[in-house]
Image (tube, coloured by chain):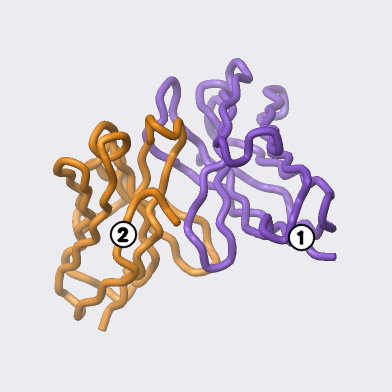
Chain colours: A purple, B orange
Amino acid sequence: QVQLLQSGAEVKKPGASVKVSCKASGYTFSSYAVHWVRQAPGQWLEWMGWVNAGNGDTKYSQKFQGRVTITRDTYASTAYMELSSLTSEDTAVYYCARGQLPHWNSFDPWGQGTLVTVSS
Amino acid sequence: QSVLTQPPSVSAAPGQKVTISCSGSSSNIGSFLVSWYQQFPGTAPKLLIYDTDKRPSGIPDRFSGSKSGTSATLGITGLQTGDEADYYCGTWDSSLSAVVFGGGTTVTVL
């Protein structure tokens, strides 16, 4: 079945970077986009950006522009999200989710989530 | 705060119906398709409705979606205790060039 499997929880110090992976299975990786969405404790969902798994094109939310980098490895069917200059406000669960190409209309499925904790 | 506005909570007795509103603007809901997600505590969101009113396979027809102008609505009929969860609406926003979500609505079965 279609599945996204994310890497494990991370604890980082302020100012550091974190890189989360998302391995896809059960579908043709290059035919879809992979999006990243985060959820701070007790908060709503916040979209960060996406990568076109086929051609590698990316688009980022203005809020994270300059601080987030989303990449993909087609041979490994894996997408990556790297967030730099971490602060305590970046403590959240980070989800990857599959989106349609060429135009997004929904996220299905989602990865299981990766908790990133930023603490000194 | 979130771009789309949802009520923080709704509740009803088992077997009853609830509706969850999602209010936006002409740059988002007014122009684009809406999706809805169900999220249980400690788990990832799950797609419930896509293209405003379509259900993925496996989603019971107790769940329905609709849109009018700049507002969308999720309806849940025959409410069950297993429906207690948080529900989020989402769509594209052309002004922000971003996917935007509502703040989420907690459904409680009395």
* Mark 1, residue position: A118
| Residue A46 in the image, given as x and y percentages of width and height | 51, 49
* Mark 2, residue position: B6
| Residue A100 in the image, given as x and y percentages of width and height | 44, 29
Crowding near the residue tagged with mark 2, few <14, some 14–19, many ≥20 C-alpha atoms within 10 Å: many
Task: Identify the residue shown where x is 27% and y is 53%.
Answer: B22
> Hey, which quadrant is residue B99 in on the image?
top left
Task: Identify the residue shown where x is 35% and y is 50%.
Answer: B4
**Amino acid, disc 1:** Val
Going by the image, does A107 lie left or right of A15? left
Circle 2 SS class: loop
Can you say which quadrant of the picture contains the C terminus of chain B?
Answer: bottom left
Q: Nearer the viewer, residue A63 or A57?
A: A63
| Residue B13 in the image, given as x and y percentages of width and height | 19, 80
Q: Do the residues at pointers 2 and 1 share their chain?
A: no
**Amino acid, disc 2:** Gln
Going by the image, does B48 lie left or right of A112? left
Q: CA distance from mark 2 to mark 1?
A: 29 Å
Chain of the residue on which disc 1 is drawn:
A
Task: Identify the residue shown where x is 67% and y is 47%.
Answer: A6
Circle 1 SS class: strand
Going by the image, does A30 lie left or right of B91? right
In the image as oriented, which residue stretches furthest toward the bottom?
B110
| Residue B73 in the image, given as x and y percentages of width and height | 21, 53
